[in-house]
Image (cartoon, rainbow, N blue to C red):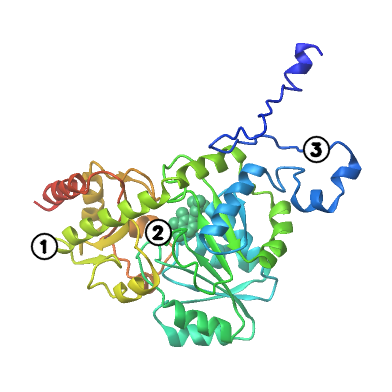
Amino acid sequence: MKNESRVIHQPRIDLPAGNEPLIGPVYRSVKFTFPSIGDAMTIEARRQGFDYARDSNPTTRQLECLCAELQGRDDAICVSTGMAAAWLALLGNLKAGDRVVFFVECYRPIRTMLRERLPQFGITHTMVSLHDHVAIEKALALDDTKLLIFEAPTNPMLQIPDFEAILAMAKANEVVTVLDNTFGGLHNHGRYDIDFLIHSLTKYASGHGDVMGGVVIADGQKIAALKPWAINMGATLDAGVAYMILRGLRTYYLRYARHSDSALKVASFLQGHARVERVFYPGLEDDPGYALAKRQMDNCGGVLSFDLGCKREQCWAFVDALELFATVASIGSTESLVAPVRLYFGQDLSGAEALQAGITDGTVRLSVGLEDPDDLIADLEQAFIKTFG
Ligand SMILES: *Cc1c(COP(=O)(O)O)cnc(C)c1O
């Protein structure tokens, strides 16, 4: 074989029997083959074999199996972003004429999907507050209601839904439940009877802010029904990225615990500060979500919000004055991040809706990173002095 051919038909490195790498290999291959068509058509090959990476890839499969296991389910489908996971879970479960119930407190792109994109395909919605159980019950009881999508804690205001109450209402009305568990993380909420758990793997799972990914996790039959949608949609997660996420997950528990501990320290500091009107963090004992979070979660994560009770200009000046917190609309990185909430997550909300969601012009969201929390508190302190004197 000429070298020109050899670079295409590369040498294979097979390991001797029993000689195992400690870290699984990254299968960069898009295509997988069998010695004969007959071999490819066996039941085992069709069930467990690999063919084309848009369908499946062993490295991506490794991540799917891990995510499913962490949430106590049989199966999962990895996709290229968290939003692709949300789209997959919704498109695979809805048809024209169906209604989706969701909460005003939710992540902005989910609201955009439900209010601006899906109506074009005949899918309607009802938006209520997650604290208004009477309105939730009414919306779930509508004949055309098919699906409920919710978050815990919510992005950006860290509200805690009452799982038992909300899931009981959904079950009674035979409504499919989808939990966007990005903030809760892969170790929380798996024990609840939720149909689909979705995550942005861009956040805590990968953890280092250098790759994007998403996952839909559910029981085997539900995933089997979604799989043809995923293959056809083509929002495939690249194997190299899956490897990066698998690598990130090795430190997931350490990171999430440290994010949570530091966020509690920062939240306590803010709560005691004269310039702060209100802190939103369910790990704080006097937060309205504390009792529910304590019952439902192991720990609350690294994101918190607070209200400066000031005008937009002062809020932006405060955000700009921070030095260790980068101004970014994301969470779950090693670095600490800050975002002006109304501007980044609430511009689509009317005045009344923003009020309902607890968002004002003075609301700031922090994603507490892995720095020493004393450094973060010192940075916040200097920003208070610089902005408010
Ligand atoms: C970031 C985020 C998403 C979307 O994830 P991407 O990977 O950015 O597409 C969905 N839900 C929540 C709660 C998020 O924070």
Badge 1 crowding class, 10 Å Cα cut-off, few under 14, some 14 to 19, many 20 or more, is: few
Quadrant the N terminus occupies: top right
Q: Amino acid at mark 3?
A: Thr
In the picture of the structure, the residue carrying the numbered disc 2 is 345
Q: Position of residue 238 (x, y in %)?
A: 61, 41
- Name the front one of labels 2 and 3: 3
Q: Is disc 2 placed on a helix, strand or loop?
A: helix
- For ligand 1, tell me if the residue under mark 1 lies within 8 Å: no
Q: Position of residue 19 (x, y in %)?
A: 61, 32
Which labelled disc corresponds to residue 274? 1
Q: Using the image, determine if residue 148 lies above or below residue 84.
A: below
Tell me, yes or no, if residue 179 can be seen here. Answer: yes
Which labelled disc corresponds to residue 33? 3
Looking at the image, the residue that sits furthest to the right is 38
Would you say 263 lies left or right of 374 here? right
Question: Residue visible at 45% across and 45% down?
Answer: 250
Badge 3 crowding class, 10 Å Cα cut-off, few under 14, some 14 to 19, many 20 or more, is: few
Q: Are marks 2 and 3 in contact (CB under 8 Å)?
A: no
